[in-house]
Image: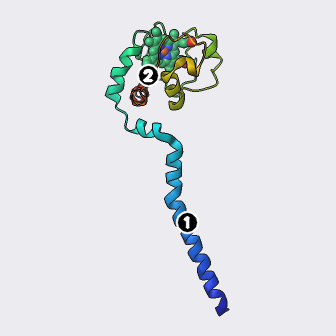
């Protein structure tokens, strides 16, 4: 049996090495998959987002229970289904997306370029080109719940 010892030792060392490598690289891999936007969201500035949200206020309200103006209320919008406010008449284009939710990714795409994300929508807004502006704004929207 003596001759099998080195083989067992080698196997144990191999397993330990694989586990150690996985421990180091898997979190990095997951981190990478989340993309740069999540880093930006983590670093987002809610107060800055509140300022940026002024540009939405011509058309949207941000308060709970406040009457919708030109656009639907954005209170509690993060995580809500697209076009789900009962008291707002959405465009056909937005209603067609009703199975999707306003998660961070979809909000980011919408605010960057509304008609690029959902062609035929009725929101007249050119979009915010700066990704950090969008993340600040989304971080602010997340507080509205
Ligand atoms: C000129 C008016 C106007 C401005 C400015 C505007 N919106 Fe809108 N928004 C609308 C309208 C109208 C709709 C409904 C679009 C439709 O039904 O096609 C809408 C829809 C939305 C929706 C989808 C809501 C839902 O219930 O599915 C979100 C999210 C949104 N806007 C966010 C924003 C943000 C954030 C800003 C500011 C950066 C902004 N909007 C600026 C008019 C506007």
User: Quick check: 100 left or right of 107?
Assistant: right
On whether ligand 1 comes within 8 Å of the CB at mark 2, the answer is yes
Quadrant of the image containing the N terminus: bottom right
Q: Position of residue 101 (x, y in %)?
A: 57, 27
User: Quick check: 108 left or right of 120?
Assistant: left
Q: Position of residue 15 (x, y in %)?
A: 59, 71
Q: In front here: 65 or 69?
A: 69
Residue wearing tag 1: 19
Q: Which quadrant would residue 42 be assigned to in this image? A: top left
Give the number of callouts: 2
At x 62%, y 77%, the residue is: 11
At x 39%, y 27%, the residue is: 133
Quadrant of the image containing the C terminus: top left
Reply above or below: 99 against 90: below
For the residue carrying disc 2, how many other residues have a C-alpha within 10 Å: few (<14), some (14-19), or many (20+)? some
Residue wearing tag 2: 128
Q: Position of residue 30 (x, y in %)?
A: 53, 49
Q: In front here: 74 or 126?
A: 126
Reply above or below: 24 against 133: below
Q: Position of residue 4 (x, y in %)?
A: 66, 87
**Mark 2 element type:** loop
């Amino acid at each position: 049996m003596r001759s099998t010892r080195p083989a067992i030792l080698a196997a144990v060392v191999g397993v330990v090495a694989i586990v150690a490598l996985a421990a180091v690289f898997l979190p990095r891999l997951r981190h990478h998959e989340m993309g740069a936007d999540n880093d930006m969201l983590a670093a987002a500035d809610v107060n800055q987002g509140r300022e940026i949200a002024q540009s939405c206020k011509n058309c949207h309200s941000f308060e709970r229970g406040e009457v919708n103006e030109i656009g639907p209320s954005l209170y509690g919008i993060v995580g809500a289904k697209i076009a789900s406010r009962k008291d707002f008449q959405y465009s056909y284009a937005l209603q067609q997306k009703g199975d999707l939710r306003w998660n961070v990714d979809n909000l980011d795409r919408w605010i960057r370029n509304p008609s690029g994300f959902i062609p035929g929508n009725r929101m007249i807004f050119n979009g915010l080109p700066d990704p950090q502006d969008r993340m600040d704004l989304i971080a602010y929207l997340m507080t509205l719940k």
